Image (spheres, grey):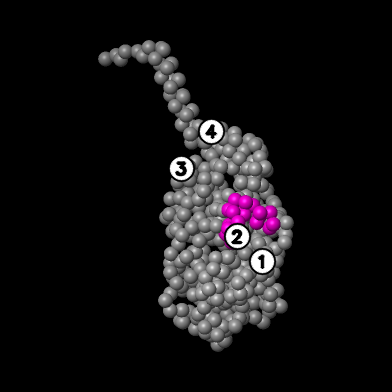
Amino acid sequence: MQTSPIPRAAALTAAALLLAGCATSNESSSGGGGGTAGVTGTAVKVGGVLTVTSATGYSTGGAQLGAKARFERANAEGGVHGRKIEFIGVEDDGMAPDKGAAAAKKLVQREKVFALLPVSAPQFGGAEFLEQQKVPWFGWATGPFWCGKQSAFGFNGCLAPKPGQGTQTWWGNQVAAQLGGGKGRTAWIQATDSTASKYGIQTIGKSFTAAGFALAGTSAALPAQAPPQDWSPYVNKIMKSAGGKAPDVVVSVMAGGKFNSGLYAALKKAGYKGLITDATSYDPKVLADPQTRQALDGVYAAPQFEPYESDAPEVAQMKADLRKTGGASAVLDQHAATGYWSAEVFLKMLEKAGKDLTRDSFYKAAENFSYENKGFGRIQYPAAKTESNGCGALVRLQGDKFTIAQNLKCFDNTKL
């Protein structure tokens, strides 16, 4: 049985409609940017993933303000190669890997962003998906899932390198400078039972031994989801860790205000007189709570940027941008700074990628990229894919204010 031939006019019409449908589909998936998602002739679309809420009380939500503030200034100055940054905000992963993975997929598949930033989440679950999709992402590289990936760009490099690669020494060296040297002194490293925190034992421990400290011990016995009701078993172990006495330094690599304030209060109650340091306590919110402020009083936080209390021009510009975007009541915490500096690195890379922006041109620009700024130090890719940028400062809480103990400084890395 023969089928009737399709009239020529109808066939041409059907073909035209099919081609039009394909063109519409391609434009929708690419954001109208010549085949590159999130890129048009006038805009680059980005969005981020943060731990805005969590059971431990830890939040990186302030990074949204930082990125937004930097993008708003860039847009006011005309954008990058004529394109404004279309920042659609952030998704909250709740410090749950599955939620982070879902957030990354939403931003890429539904929102069709060009890049993810800021990304700052201790248990981010979207790393492998972004690498597979070749979608660049920028942020605070606090876990091993950042390292060795073409798509990942930590403004501070890779803080969880593999054995044999370069790891930071700045934290140990800055604490040693505060104490007048690390030789002959001991340090205890405290973590929780999470991937990033446990890996931190290796890298932070190496930082302190490279600076001359001896390790009194380490522990990742604390559950990651909630602090213990009774701190005494953990504190008792710490207080006897250095040959039956307390160590000179206690280093926390725990992500969560409740963890740190609980541990520090218990240590002080037990009579601990040594130096306490962590990566998260540089937060003006602690000043509003008398109990937390008391627990953290005297603690040395270790931000990876020049502190807000500095008179450096780059810091003054950052503060002005944050206040312009967030108002006079804008919270100037370390997460706002990490979001700001992540956006800064992204913008500089966009400039290098040129006007004909595609993911390929962006990655080509990243192949040999270096940038220095007194606000956060330095960054160089591809080296930063596998090791830290080596820069950090120390800030101490004293009563009701933070003071700079050690200004930002960069140190050579050492092999892990």
- Please name the residue shown 45% across and 46% down the image: 106
Identified by mark 1, the residue type is Ala
On screen, residue 395 versus residue 289, left or right, reads right
* Residue 118 x %, y %: 55, 52
Q: Amino acid at mark 2?
A: Leu
Q: Which mark is residue 332?
A: 2
Asked whether disc 1 touches disc 3, contact meaning CB atoms under 8 Å apart, the reply is: no
Residue marked by disc 4:
32
Disc 1 marks which residue? Answer: 393
What residue would you read off at disc 3?
109
10 Å crowding of disc 1: few (<14), some (14-19), many (20+): many
Whichever of labels 3 and 2 marks the residue nearer the N terminus, that label is 3
User: Extreme front residue here?
Assistant: 328
Instruction: Depth check: give the residue in front, 131 or 256.
Output: 256
Span of residues in magenta: 315-335
**Chain-order first, disc 4 or disc 3:** 4
Q: Nearer the viewer, mark 1 or mark 3?
A: 1
Distance between the Cα atoms at labels 3 and 2? 33 Å
Q: Is residue 284 magenta?
A: no
Image height of 49 relative to 162, above or below = above
Marks 4/1: CA–CA distance: 43 Å
